[in-house]
Amino acid sequence: MIPLQVLHDQRSGEDVIEVPLRGQMLLEIPLLNKGSAFSEEERRELGLEGLLPPHVSTPEEQLERSYHNFRSKTSDIEKYVFLASLQDRNETLYYKLLGAHVAEMLPIVYTPTVGLACQEYSQLYRRPRGLYLAYPHRDRLVAMLRNAPHPEVRVIVVTDGERILGLGDLGVGGLGISIGKLALYSLCAGIHPASTLPVVLDVGTDNRRLLEDPLYLGWRHERIRGEAYDAFVAAFVDALRTVFPEALLQWEDFSKGNARRLLDRYRDELCSFNDDIQGTGAVTLAGMLAAVEAAGARLRDQRIVHLGGGSAATGICDQTVAALVQDGCPEPEAIASIWMVDSRGLVLASRSDLEAAKRRYARSDAEIAAWQRSGPALPTIEDVVRNVRPTILVGTAAQPGAFHEGLVREMARHCPRPIFFPLSNPTSKSEARPSDLVAWTDGRALVATGSPFPPVEHAGRTIAIGQCNNVFVFPGVGLGVIASGARRVSDAMFLAAARALSARAPIRRSPGGALYPGVEEVRTVAREVAIAVADRAQAEGLAEPASLAETARKVDAAIWEPRYARVKYRALE
């Protein structure tokens, strides 16, 4: 482990890092390597003369060169590989490049391209990043965590690779999601890369294509489940508390059967959250609040239908109910505003296959006794829309085309400003295209999507399509937790994040605006979310009290800017 403590030289005004490395070894550390930007003085002191081209590049020259190379790639996956290679060579330049071209590069380093990269992880593998904690090594987890490249880890993203986006079980390839999420923590919230750690819990895979692939890098075994799986996760949590007791843990892309169960099991023992549940819930709620206000209505007057009954859907529902209750709506009334349709049909209390999180939103058979139905089976999404007449339709079922023309027109018949959230990722899994939703509602629809879509032209006006992207929430939550020293992460902290994000919605300032800010604003949004989250943590007694001004100062002090520090050699004592 190499400490990367940055010191500030008061005389020169420079940031300085002292390291016990010289020559080629120094160039192998991506957070220390400046490549051609090492100064002449640094090259002499650090034994780099002759190892680098003679011209000393400015950071601007490096950015220009890197962007030219990026644009020369002919496919998104080639661009992903180029950026990953840059991250492995020169991490400061990597974040400077991403920050200069956020809108263009965010879909490359994260959704949708990261999904393809996870699918091809073993074929694209070049250099290790993060930790691979495999089940056969379950008695060595403490030692493996201590092998992390940096000693001061503050944020960890962990996955077991079973439910990567809408792509299913990708085994060890799921580590690409952990890497991508943490890149966004640093890009959007300024969390220092040396304080982040991506982790995959490799418990095998049930993906036959991977098991039969001679290049697959993971443990070649069917997934461990049941008590053995739970014991392995428990051992990981115990090891984490031993090695990194102050780290924030983000559970990422676990299966529907494990995601909420693990969150509930450990949320009071660890400073942790599940982005698929709480992050998705908060970012979607933010868009709903903005859309409802734009429609001239109140959230408590909406009829909300969810297509999808997984952890994302229940997370959105839970956040919606929490917001309604906070605004004075009785909880039973808040729950009653939500209808959920899963892969079998309408979620009914008479069904015996419901998890606890889903059962909270089950309807009674009496409520649908007089419905017009398409058949004797459980009511379909079409049946629900016809009878409930929803004002908001949310999709998390990864069923492309599920919001079809007949369904949308039926909803629009009874609602002056229908609100649609086709949220499934990647783009190929989206429940509808925004252009269709706008056309089928004669331009009345308010739309936000999970994947990025271009603006829609309709009747001489341009309609911006906001992306309901968790990147607007989870980096700011992490920054708020770090800045405040919060001991736990509460649902109320996510509700505070949702309201802070919603306040930034362009549609609040312009009728043609989107329900979410542009991704170019993610750094500003993350700071405001962080202040709101930290303030809420203090109000709940989860962090030491501070004034709002002091909280803002703590948040600003925790933000890392990707700029080169002067590197000096200092021998180990």
Image: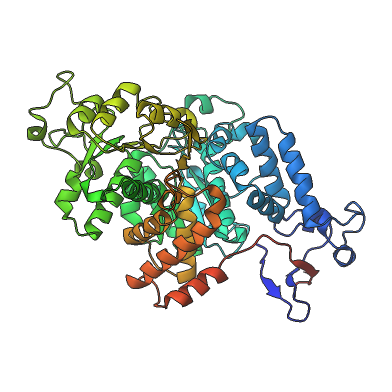
Question: Considering only vertical position in the picture, is 409 above or below 47?
Answer: above
Question: Considering only vertical position in the picture, is 495 above or below 87?
Answer: below
Q: Position of residue 240 (x, y in %)?
A: 47, 59
For the C terminus, which image quadrant?
Answer: bottom right
Q: For the image shown, how many numbered marks are present on the structure?
A: 0
Please say whether residue 376 is visible from this viewpoint.
Answer: yes
Residue at 59%, 54% in the rendered image: 187
Please say whether residue 247 is visible from this viewpoint.
Answer: no
Q: Position of residue 272 (x, y in %)?
A: 40, 58
Q: Position of residue 301 (x, y in %)?
A: 21, 47
Left or right of 503? Residue 127 is: right
- The front one of 275 and 67 is 67
Left or right of 146? Residue 408 is: left
Question: Considering only vertical position in the picture, is 416 above or below 210?
Answer: below
Q: Quadrant of residue 267?
A: bottom left
- The front one of 13 and 443 is 443
Find the residue positioned furthest to the bottom.
11
For the N terminus, which image quadrant?
Answer: bottom right
Left or right of 163? Residue 89 is: right
Q: Position of residue 442 (x, y in %)?
A: 36, 29
Residue at 29%, 28% in the rendered image: 343
Q: How is the image coloured?
A: rainbow
Q: Quadrant of residue 74?
A: top right
Find the residue positioned furthest to the top.
375
